[in-house]
Image: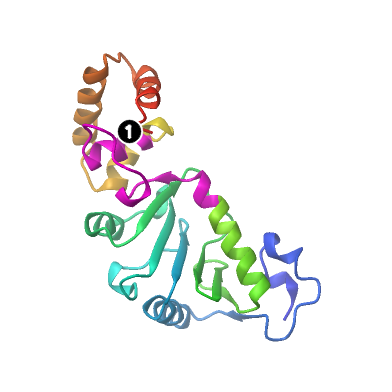
Amino acid sequence: MSRELLPPYLRCHCTRPSHHAARGVTDRAEIDRLERGLLRNAHVEARLLSVDDQPGHHPDDWGLVGVRRRTIYTANALDDNTATSLAQGVEEVRVLRNRPATGLLVVDDVAVLRSGPAGAVVVRAPELVALTAAYFDALWTDAVPLGDGDRTPADGLSAVQQRIVRLAANGFKDDTIARMLGLSTRSVRRHMERLAARVGATNRLSLGVAATRLGWV
């Protein structure tokens, strides 16, 4: 296997990869089957990074109860499945403002690195899987929480209001927030107006300052 198949964050750690360290897959249907199989048979944890042109998975694809499930989306990768996941509480969800170079899936001891809409690299070498998981965890730290499982809800805020204020504090616009959460832009603006009135804020900046002071974000 050529090390050029690997993304840069793994390539520097794999100067002499073995034949079985990773393999390329170019058939989209095969990639989908592989990822669904990994998710449905997960035992400990599944991590998914879904970028713009590499969609996530329907909640029904996820595996057994008791498996930790974390997903990071870019803003443009969010779809109706995200709202379903949030409503059902089936996974922890966060969103990134910046688009990573590639999407990925790490399930227990296997990683799938997506190299575009129709390509992926399946990684089984333990050290490379560990590095991929660590890369996901670093992105997770920087991403904005959307699910209720990430933090204790702020006093007096509904789950939807807390998601809205987190996203607004991180610079997302009302129409983007609405699409992320499956709401209308008008509904998002009404929530923002109520939150601003509650803390006496006159604009988004002062609302963000108040939200930080009150521990809402």
Residue holding disc 1? 165
At horizontal 57% and vertical 51% (from top left) the residue drawn is 138
Relative to residue 67, is residue 19 depicted above or below? below
Q: Position of residue 193 (x, y in %)?
A: 22, 23
> Where is 68 relative to 27, above or below?
above
The answer to whether any part of residue 43 appears in the image is yes
The foreground one among 78 and 166 is 166
Q: Quadrant of residue 44?
A: bottom left
Q: How is the image coloured?
A: rainbow
Q: Quadrant of residue 60?
A: bottom left
- Seen at 44% across and 76% down, the residue is 35
Pointer 1: residues within 10 angstroms few (<14), some, or many (20+)? many
Residue beneath the point at 37% across and 37% down:
167
Residue 19 lies within the magenta run? no
Front residue of 160 and 81: 160
Q: Quadrant of residue 61?
A: bottom left
**Does residue 157 show up magenta in the picture?**
yes
Q: Identify the amino acid type marked 1.
A: Val
Q: Position of residue 209 (x, y in %)?
A: 40, 20
Decide if residue 98 is in sight here: no
- In the rendered image, the quadrant that contains the C terminus is top left
Q: Which quarter of the figure is the N terminus placed in?
A: bottom right
Q: At 54% from the left edge and 66% from the top edge, which residue is drawn?
A: 116
* Magenta span: 139-167
